[in-house]
Amino acid sequence: MFDAQPHLSDEDLILAADGEAPSLQALRVRAHLAVCPRCRKILLQLERASADFARAHRETFTPHIPSGQGPRALLRARLAEIAQSSRPAFWPSLRQRTPSLGWAAVAAIAVTGIALGSLVFHRNPSSENTPQAAWPEAGLVPNRDLTPGATRPVSLAQVCSAPHEEVVKEVSPSQRASVFEEYGIRESNAEDYEVDYLIAPGLGGTDDIHNLWPEPYRAGTWDAHVKDALEERLHQMVCAHQLDLQTAQRAIASDWISAYKKYFATDRPQFVAAVPQSPLLLSRRTTVRAG
Amino acid sequence: MRLFEEFREPLLRYGLSLGIDVHDAEEVVQETFLALFQHLRQGRSRKNLRGWIFRVTHNLALKRCYAIKALRARTEPGELMVQEPPDPGPTPEQQFSDWQRRRQLLAVVQALPQTDQNCLRLRAEGLRYREIAAVLGVSLGTVSMSLARSFSRLIRADGR
């Protein structure tokens, strides 16, 4: 667009304007701009384009951002959950990497770090995890890579009227073993989990392994009963034509806790014992307790 | 939590700009900070945390995009829509004009190569070039060339 010589290139100008140019180059740019109206004009255009885009970017997406109060509370709860619970998927790997570390020390590390600002650091120089690999381990929500959710072609009428026996299948022992293997859960720890459907059969979920995950029995506040209540709520909304089936499937597959907060309009689980459960949705009945 | 307060909104904007909806973007940010918690607890580097945080969000958001596409492929096409920029609705003339111009500008950006788009978005969120390079896994030279190319395109499109 612009001559590279003897004038400055757009890249030189952008680097200098952003304070990213090496000092000598920045001096050269400054000296050139002092005597070149053409490059000053181009710099002005570049700066305007930059400012225009930054403003458009903010004005387009910022209005979609809701209040941070709920997410802040959820993150606090999740961090506390991680810090305070003994998480089987975490402990074996930590113990394997640090065989000399006793359980007491491991537990001490876990319960100490409740908030980011009060962390106890335990250096593990052998670890080669990248940020991408630092995925939250098995817990309140499934690993999305392993359990993205799977559905079968199903009509609204089928979802809302099919008998329980037609939509629910028992998870086979081999499937259960495969799920535990995927999540790196030892057989000795398997009894702490049940294999649950991510997308409930009553919402069109299948028994494909991509729709099965090990749900901890001791999950704290957001346990399987709360998820059952969400499944019931989504089923009611779908059958009342308040929510389309695919949206319900996606909501529960992407993050069932956030979906619960959204569709119950609350940041905390309600008293789930009072929630009537449709036989279509009792995915927990279909799971097999290991051990 | 201080980092969460500081970065939640920029990370959400970046996630939304990548094409996931606000529900997914919120969860991506949660996962990012859970990963950060593990990262710090395991005594890993605290250098360039802003770049690290954006990098994790970038990776998780892309994974989310792939998961959404996979789910969409198994359900009815067209059911999973990417969030659109907000429509201002009935507004004064100037506001409507600004909205139109913003849409045109974003349309130009959306026609750029993906790396160029992401460089622009990360720069708009205040990241330095070395941070952008780390997030996207490209060289510093690529970042500066990409930005220069993109801004030139925006200037041409605007007829200035």
Image (tube, rainbow, N blue to C red):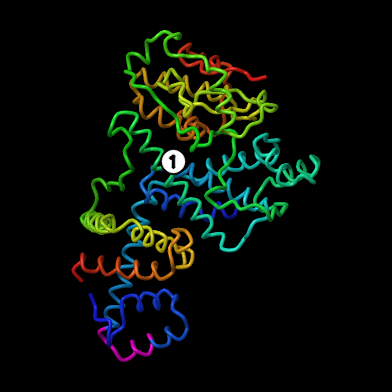
Q: Which residue ends up furthest to the front in the rendered image?
A: A174
Q: Position of residue A127 (x, y in %)?
A: 65, 52
**Relative height, residue A178 to residue B6 (above, below):** above
Q: Residue at x 46, y 21 (%)?
A: A207
In the rendered image, residue A50 lying in the magenta stretch gets the answer: no
Residue A162 lies in what quarter of the image?
Answer: top left
* Badge 1: residue crowd in 10 Å (few <14, some 14–19, many ≥20): many
Assess whether residue A34 is covered by the magenta stretch. yes
Q: How far from the left and from the top, in percent, is residue A200? A: 46, 21
Q: Which residues are magenta?
A: A29-38
The image shows a total of numbered marks equal to 1
Q: Residue furthest left?
A: B159
Answer above or below: position of A177 versus A109.
Answer: above
Q: Nearer the viewer, residue B160 or A87?
A: A87
Secondary structure beneath dot 1 equals: helix
| Residue A32 drawn above or below residue A15 | below
| Horizontal side of residue A229 vs A204, given as left or right | right
- Our reading of the magenta stretch's main secondary structure is helix
**Residue that carries the numbered disc 1 in the rendered image:** B24
Residue toward you, B92 or A165: A165
| Chain for numbered disc 1 | B
Q: Quadrant of the C terminus of chain A?
A: top right
Which residue is depicted at the point 40% across and 71% down?
A: B141
Residue depicted at 51% across the width and 26% down the height: A212
The picture places residue A182, in percent across and down from the top left corner, at 56, 33
Q: Position of residue B113 (x, y in %)?
A: 30, 58
User: Observer-nearest residue: B118 or A222?
Assistant: B118
Q: Quadrant of the N terminus of chain A?
A: bottom left
- The three-letter amino acid code for the residue at tag 1 is Asp
Quarter of image, res B122: bottom left
